[in-house]
């Protein structure tokens, strides 16, 4: 009987995608690894960014007004930090936004960072990302060091807390990040309906 149960578990687990078996993102723990195809047709493997001082994983959208309010700020952040050996990855996990939508949006908004399409929202599920924009900052060892918002308001004239900048500056200076989590706000990620939903 025990052998039968073990066989059942191996069979069921063997049917699950590898991403589903990976650990979820936890603060100060290694971030879940992933590979996604970018809108440029290239495959991006998170593990290949291990030589960077930091990796900023940004869940973004094409139609969300909150995410769109941050387009220029995301471009500015990339411009300010990519020369400091910080990688940026934009991830679109919305089931309602096609690859063509994502390509056109990235081109229109002049995103110079890679934008990846998370078909089936596997990476969003791994990271438990709920909204756009939502940010995860990893250090050079791909350990999660910050999670949350870019700053405190989608209205640029009301911003007085620069959470993502503060986290990156501390990380690059080799200091402890004083605020490791700041609740993200925005539009809910439109996920693929699962059989259990």
Image (cartoon, rainbow, N blue to C red):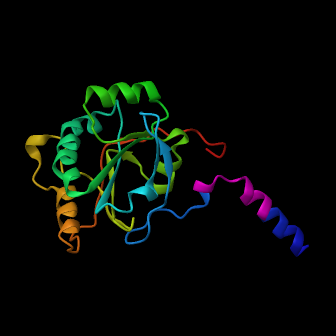
* Of the pair 90 and 83, the residue shown nearer to us: 83
- In this rendering, would 61 be left or right of 45? left
The quarter of the rendered structure image containing the N terminus is: bottom right
The quarter of the rendered structure image containing the C terminus is: top right
Image location of residue 117, percent across then percent down = 46, 38
Image location of residue 129, percent across then percent down = 42, 51
Write the residue at 47% across / 49% down. Answer: 124
Q: Which residues are magenta?
A: 10-19
Image location of residue 189, percent across then percent down = 43, 41
Judge whether 179 appears above or below 191 on screen.
below
Figure quadrant of residue 186: top left
Image location of residue 105, percent across then percent down = 33, 28
- In this rendering, would 108 be left or right of 50? left
* Of the pair 40 and 36, the residue shown nearer to us: 40
Asked if residue 151 can be seen in this view, the reply is: no
* Of the pair 193 and 175, the residue shown nearer to us: 175
Q: Is 12 one of the magenta-colored residues?
A: yes
Asked if residue 148 can be seen in this view, the reply is: yes
Write the residue at 25% across / 31% down. Answer: 110
- In this rendering, would 68 be left or right of 36? left
In the rendered picture of this protein, how many numbered marks are placed on residues? 0
Write the residue at 62% across / 42% down. Answer: 194
- Mostly what secondary structure, the magenta segment? helix
Write the residue at 50% across / 55% down. Answer: 126
Figure quadrant of residue 79: top left
């Amino acid at each position: 009987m025990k052998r039968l149960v073990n066989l059942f578990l191996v069979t069921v687990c063997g049917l699950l995608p590898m991403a589903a078996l990976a650990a979820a993102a936890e603060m100060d723990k290694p971030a879940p690894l992933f590979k996604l195809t970018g809108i440029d047709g290239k495959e991006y493997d998170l593990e290949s960014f291990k030589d960077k001082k930091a990796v900023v994983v940004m869940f973004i959208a094409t139609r969300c007004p909150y995410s769109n309010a941050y387009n220029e700020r995301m471009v500015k952040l990339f411009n300010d930090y990519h020369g400091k050996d910080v990688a940026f990855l934009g991830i679109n996990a919305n089931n309602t936004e096609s690859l063509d939508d994502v390509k056109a949006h990235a081109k229109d908004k002049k995103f110079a960072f890679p934008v990846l399409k998370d078909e089936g929202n596997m990476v969003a599920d791994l990271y438990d990302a709920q909204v756009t924009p939502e940010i995860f900052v990893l250090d050079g060892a791909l350990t999660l060091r910050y999670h949350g918002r870019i700053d405190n308001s989608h209205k640029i004239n009301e911003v007085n807390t620069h959470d993502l900048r503060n986290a990156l500056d501390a990380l690059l200076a080799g200091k402890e990040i004083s605020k490791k989590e700041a609740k993200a706000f925005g539009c809910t990620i439109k996920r693929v309906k699962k059989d259990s939903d």
